[in-house]
Amino acid sequence: MSAYARLAARLRGGDKPLRILSASGQLGLGIPQRAFEAGIDRAPHAIAADMGSVDPGPAYLGSGRMAAPSAMARRDLALVLEGARKLDVPLLIGSAGTAGGAPHLAMVEGLLREVAAELGLSFRLATIAADVPHALVRTADKQARLASIGQINADIDNSAAIVGQMGQRPFASALSQGADVILAGRACDTAPFAVVPVLLGYPKGPAVHMAKILECTSLCCVPGGRDAMLATLEGDGFILESMNPARAATPLSVAAHALYEQADPVRVFEPEGHVDLSGATYDAVDDRRVRCKGAVWHDAAIPSVKIEGARLLGHRVALLAGVADPGFIAQSDDILARLQDAVADLIPPVHDAPWQLSFRRYGIDGVLDWPTPPDAAPREIFILGECIAADAETARMVAATARQQLLHWGFEGRVCTGGNLAFPVTPPELDAGLGLCLFALPHHETGQLGGPGCAFSCHAARYLKGCPMSQPSEDYVKEFNADRITEPARSALIIVDMQYATGHRTGALAQRMAAEGNTITDWRFDRIDALVIPNTQRLIKAMRVVGGKVIYVTIGAALSDCSDAPVHMRAFFQSVGNYEGQRAHQIINELAPEPGDPIVRKTSIGAFASTGLDHLLRSLDREHLFLTGVSTNMCVETTAREAADRGYAVTLVEDACATTHKELHEGTMRNFARFFGKVRSTEDVIDLLS
């Protein structure tokens, strides 16, 4: 029986006090431990946390990276997971990894797996994907079921990622399927906090009102903060209390927070409807607690989902400079406008290499585009320049040219000819990653949320008690396995055997096991869904950005009788139909090659034994190889060892590989890291490339 099922057996009906602990509104950026532990001591019936938002901008959705440092996210996950399992209560986390896309969900699930292994915890986990297929959004657009929020260019086809902001229903589905822990992609802030009370029969209006305030933890208090917050629902209202005794919830502070991030002062809109706060009351229970009552829920006639997407504008370089010359400051508007023309004369934007250059003057118009200039000119200003270009080299070139022109720009009344600018860092041009823009659209869904019309897919898996993968503390080979640093542009991503035969849950091997009632491959396909596919997608994107090569390796026969395959492989190829012309032989759609990506077809376990892969890599001048795919201990490992023996620098991407048995996967990683090459996470590889 799940944690929720045990809770429902005791509290269903909504007539007893129900305690919900809000652990964090920014999980991964630090949970104050003392207040959280005080909340655990109050024996909450559920623990919830929000982990993301679009507030940080489109970069995280578009790049697949998360805003929180991995080490801090891991620490926060350990706190909430251990607390929830100690109390045997549901743990619900929304908007995993900042933006809540597939890469973010996979990243956080990987951290959660590590934490669970270290703590020796066993529980049932549901992950809920929030990614929305481009085709679904295009169809909704053609059917006039999309409406733009503001003046936004919704470039659906060129979007790097699109997610939908799920409401309560996917969480409710996961709880009903027996999940103890729910890790969701992009979600409404309120959903993980409100769903347990609503499922148990508590009034939906007060539950959603509570969730709206609770998701930001103690931000609604005086003074506001990030400490854990406890809500107790009873009857038609709830009581709020910060777990930090230095923070007080007051009627004014809580009522004010109900307006937080809301365009309408009395209606809070969610995918399934809205809560009306026009009759809400806020009364002090004592000097630190507030009772809220009177919220009323209204179901939507047609549920809707907010769709968020990010598209790539180019590569971005920032220019940082300060100015204290009063003459320059007074004429800076004209100077920066003329600078654009001067740079364009030196580096004309062309069709194949377009660029954009813009400036913000902090002290004048850096934060807001004020309608009028300041009454008195500031003593100094900070100039932030930004160049976005089709490639990183052009962006750097334009920014550096702008800097040098601006440094010695002549203007009327100039006194000092030695230079106009002060640089806070050198070089003053900093790579700022990819330039992306965000769009948001309400998707008016005619079917049920979470149904076929909307792509919130829930997948459950069981963790077993175990220990984390470890290396011997002292190993004589370590001193001989040093890092080999190479240019990212001389790298290649080798994607091994990601075909329908054995690399997809809908493929031949998975179907055969399901027909036999055999669960031996569950760990394999769980890992492929949760980690291998989304992490490989991130690696493909990162490799292309730095000019690396993406190379696909496939396994299977060319002939339908598989007689061209090694004797020991023929029967297996035949059993799953892995020969040319069959679906089993095809590369899975989620990782489909782009035009120009080499596809190396092998019949052997290792890719070098039966192909011209070595010749291809040397022709392309590739030195560092990053391997992903299946199966870890077979084709991936053999190919990696063959590459190491041929002099390549080789990295196995641990969270982008899978096999049938966990111990075989970990054994491969442990053994390969001793002498053959490096074992890294997807996040570490992306950091290395960038």
Image (cartoon, helix red, strand yellow):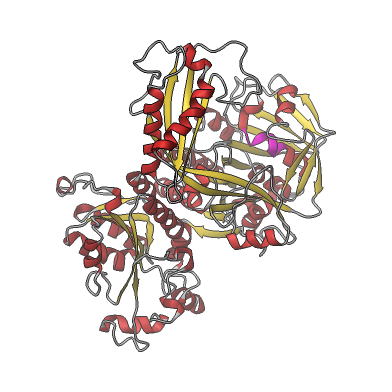
Q: Quadrant of the C terminus?
A: top left
Picture coordinates of residue 573, whole percent (x, y) = 36, 81
Q: Residue at x 38, y 67 (%)?
A: 660
Position of 22 relative to 654 (above/below):
above
Q: Main secondary structure of the magenta part?
A: helix
Relative depth, front residue between 381 and 618: 381
Q: Quadrant of the N terminus?
A: bottom right
Relative depth, front residue between 551 and 351: 351
Picture coordinates of residue 232, whole percent (x, y) = 70, 35
Magenta region: which residues? 210-216
- Residue 411 picture quarter: top left
404 with respect to 374 (left or right): left
State yes or no: residue 658 in magenta. Answer: no
State the count of labels: 0
- Residue 655 picture quarter: bottom left
Position of 357 relative to 246 (above/below):
below
Relative depth, front residue between 254 and 375: 375
Picture coordinates of residue 513, whole percent (x, y) = 46, 76
